[in-house]
C-alpha cells in the first residue's frame, strides 16, 4: 500500500521552505560603475557637439541661384552642344545635353560643376539647375558616364560630356539653356 505523508501543521517543519519562497531579496549592488556612466556621457557629448558643428557648417550657395563663373572656366570651353530627351516606361522624362569640353589651360582639372539656366517666355525667373559635369566613358551598348575625378582633364584634353536633367519646368521655352562652369577643381 501507499504511505501517506502527513501534512505538517502550520508553523512546524515546513517553515524553512516557506521562508525560502517568500523571503524578501536583498537589493543587488549595481553592476555598472561610475566610470562606465562617465564614458557613456562623454560619448553622447561628443556626438551632440559633432551634430552642432555640422549644422553650423556653411552649405555653400543655394543651388537655384545663379553663381559666378569659376576662375578656371575660361580655360574650359564647352562646344558642340546637342540636346535630346528620353521618356521612361514609368512616364518620367529626362533631358540630356551632350557636348565637348577642352582643357586649354595649364592645370589638370579633377571636377567640374555647371549651372544650366532654363529660360521661359512668360517673363518669370528661369529655372537654374546645378549639376556635376559627367564625362562619357562609352557609347555602346548605351551611353555610360563617369565623374571628371575618375578621368581628370589634363592640359590639352578634349572629352565628350553629358549633363542629365530629370525635372524641368513645364513653362521652359525648349531652347538650349545657358551653361556656365561655376566650379572647377584643379591640381
Image (tube, grey):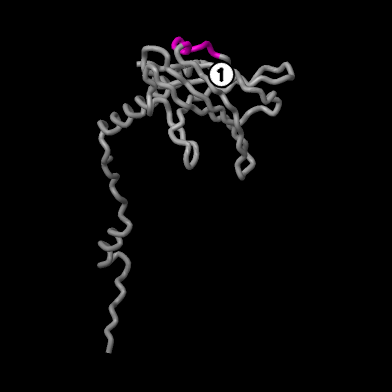
Q: For residue 73: magenta?
A: yes
Q: Residue drawn at (52%, 16%), measured in percent from left and top? A: 61
Q: Which sits in the foreground, 99 or 49?
A: 99
User: Which part of the image, by quadrant, shows the N terminus?
Assistant: bottom left
Question: Number of callouts in the render?
Answer: 1
Residue at the spot of label 1 = 179
Q: With 71 as the anchor, is 63 left or right in this view?
A: right
x, y percentage for residue 187? Answer: 34, 16
Q: Give the range drawn in magenta.
A: 67-74
> Who's the residue at 30% across and 62% down the image?
18
Q: Which picture quadrant has residue 94?
A: top right
Q: In this view, does 47 lie above or below 105?
A: below
Write the residue at 27% across / 84% down: 3
Relative image position of residue 12 (x, y in whole percent): 27, 67
Label 1 CA crowd tier, 10 Å (few <14, some 14–19, many 20+): some
Instruction: Determine if the magenta segment contains residue 81.
Output: no
Of 20 and 7, the residue lying toward us: 20
Residue 9 placement: quadrant: bottom left
Is residue 70 found left or right of 151 in the rendered image? right
SS type, badge 1: strand
| Depth check, front residue: 65 or 146 | 146
Give the left or right position of residue 153, taking residue 116 as reference: left
Quadrant in the picture for residue 178: top right
Q: Which residue is at the far bottom?
A: 1
Q: Where is residue 100 in the image (x, y as percent from the top left)?
A: 49, 23
| Magenta-drawn stretch, dominant element (helix, strand or loop) | loop
Q: Residue visible at 71% across and 17% down?
A: 124
Name above or below for residue 38 compared with residue 32.
above
Q: Position of residue 105 (x, y in %)?
A: 40, 12
Amino acid at each position: 500500500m501507499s504511505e501517506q505523508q502527513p501534512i505538517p501543521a502550520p508553523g512546524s517543519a515546513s517553515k524553512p521552505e516557506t521562508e525560502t519562497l517568500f523571503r524578501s531579496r536583498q537589493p543587488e549592488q549595481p553592476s555598472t560603475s561610475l566610470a562606465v556612466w562617465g564614458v557613456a556621457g562623454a560619448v553622447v557629448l561628443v556626438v551632440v557637439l559633432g551634430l552642432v558643428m555640422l549644422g553650423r557648417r556653411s552649405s555653400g550657395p543655394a543651388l537655384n541661384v545663379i553663381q559666378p563663373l569659376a576662375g578656371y572656366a575660361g580655360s574650359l570651353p564647352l562646344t558642340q552642344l546637342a540636346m535630346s530627351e528620353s521618356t521612361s516606361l514609368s512616364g518620367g522624362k529626362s533631358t540630356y545635353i551632350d557636348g565637348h569640353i577642352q582643357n586649354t589651360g595649364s592645370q589638370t582639372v579633377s571636377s567640374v560643376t555647371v549651372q544650366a539656366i532654363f529660360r521661359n517666355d512668360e517673363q518669370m525667373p528661369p529655372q537654374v539647375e546645378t549639376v556635376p559635369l559627367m564625362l562619357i566613358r562609352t557609347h555602346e551598348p548605351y551611353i555610360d558616364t563617369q565623374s571628371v575625378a575618375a578621368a581628370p582633364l589634363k592640359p590639352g584634353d578634349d572629352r565628350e560630356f553629358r549633363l542629365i536633367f530629370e525635372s524641368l519646368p513645364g513653362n521652359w521655352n525648349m531652347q538650349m539653356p545657358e551653361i556656365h562652369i561655376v566650379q572647377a577643381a584643379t591640381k
